[in-house]
Image (cartoon, helix red, strand yellow):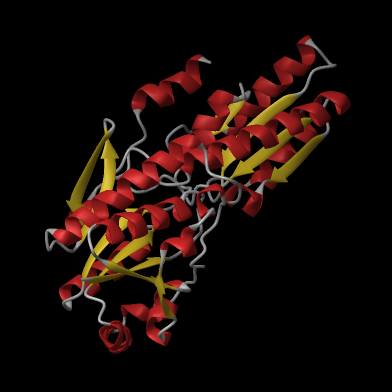
């Protein structure tokens, strides 16, 4: 049996660990494992190479993905997918493990319907895939944000400023919510934890009226609210200097945490097990610390809901 691995969409820490686990589990079961470089784009272009144990030496400490990643919107076209399948068949590849987000999952499902069994692994820092409690890279990204906010607090305190920090998440508020709780932010603004600008302005005003030498940290999810509008209101109505910090792509990098290393390894081994059973069109998740799998269409139809107890913590703390 020959299987391929690709990483697609945004990179996330832990992807390399999943790759290493798939290669090791595959070789242990007599499977030849092939790396598909640059995602679906590389599949179409035939950028495929057999992976040996020497190819994965030392990669578990590194963020990003050794297979690199790219986006290919044209993959939704049947003719483009057919060309990809021809490339896979030229290498004798019967099945593929796809590590990425929901867009990557759809490509995996379409390939499965065309005869190439595919298994999806949730590789995204956003934690926006509903069928899993945690995605690969989410925990590492949290720790990166926590460090960044620790540094922001130093400069905010030195200047008695209010800093509005925008976190990634692609419309999912989990990164902002978890990190806001973990850093004792004054306000957390996410789609699952909405707070009006009026309440934020009044809260900042009350804090600075009580102690003019204090500082304030506000966390908000990207694509949720207009940070510039909030900054202008705090500047004009409270009078304290306010700055916006967009953390950006630094959140994607870094050596994966222990949690992400173990999570991605467990998921990688599960992917090989499913392929050995002849299954395709499935995606893997973790629920209550148990590795589970779902039909991809079923998974994509699920609605992502933030744990209400976590959201409640944001109000209490």
Q: Quadrant of residue 282?
A: bottom left
Vertical relation: 168 (above or below) 53:
above
- The residue drawn where x is 16% and y is 77% is 115
Name the quadrant of the N terminus: bottom left
Q: Visible in this render: residue 300? A: no
In the displayed structure, 51 sits above or below 233; it is below
Q: Where residue 21 appears, x then y in whole percent?
A: 36, 52
> Would you say 164 lies left or right of 173 here?
right
Q: Name the residue at 42% across, 35% down.
A: 192
User: Which of the 4 quarters of the picture holds residue 7?
Assistant: bottom left
* Residue 106 appears left or right of 173: left
The front one of 82 and 21 is 21
The extreme right residue here reads 159
129 or 190, nearer to the observer: 129
Is residue 233 depicted above or below 296 in this figure? Answer: above
Q: How many marks?
A: 0
In-front residue for pair 4/137: 4
Is residue 167 rendered to the left or right of residue 132?
right
Residue at the location (69% across, 28% down)? 217
């Amino acid at each position: 049996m020959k299987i391929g691995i690709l990483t697609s969409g945004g990179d996330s820490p832990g992807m390399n660990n999943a790759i290493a686990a798939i290669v090791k589990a595959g070789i242990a079961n007599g499977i030849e494992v092939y790396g598909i470089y640059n995602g679906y784009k590389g599949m179409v272009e035939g950028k495929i190479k057999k992976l040996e144990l020497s190819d994965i030496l030392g990669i578990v400490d590194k963020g990003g993905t050794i297979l690199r990643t790219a986006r290919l919107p044209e993959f939704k076209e049947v003719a483009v997918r057919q060309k990809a399948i021809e490339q896979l068949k030229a290498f004798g590849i019967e099945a593929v493990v796809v590590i990425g987000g929901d867009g990557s999952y759809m490509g995996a499902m379409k390939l499965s319907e065309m005869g190439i069994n595919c298994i999806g692994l949730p590789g995204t820092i956003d934690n926006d895939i509903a069928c899993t409690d945690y995605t690969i890279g989410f925990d590492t990204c949290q720790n990166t944000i926590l460090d960044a906010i620790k540094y922001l607090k130093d400069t905010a305190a030195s200047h008695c400023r209010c800093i509005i920090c925008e976190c990634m998440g692609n419309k999912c508020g989990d990164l902002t919510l978890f990190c806001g709780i973990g850093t004792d932010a004054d306000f957390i603004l996410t789609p699952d934890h909405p707070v009006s600008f009026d309440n934020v302005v009044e809260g900042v005003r009350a804090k600075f009226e009580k102690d003019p030498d204090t500082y304030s940290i506000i966390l908000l999810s990207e694509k949720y609210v207009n940070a510039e509008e909030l900054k202008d209101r705090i500047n004009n109505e409270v009078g304290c200097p306010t700055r916006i910090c967009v953390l950006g792509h630094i959140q994607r990098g870094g050596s994966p945490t222990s949690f992400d290393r173990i999570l991605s390894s467990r998921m990688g081994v599960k992917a090989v097990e499913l392929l050995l059973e002849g299954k395709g069109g499935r995606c893997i998740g973790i629920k209550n610390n148990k590795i589970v799998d779902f039909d991809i269409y079923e998974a994509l139809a699920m609605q992502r809901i933030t744990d209400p107890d976590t959201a409640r913590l944001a109000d209490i703390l």
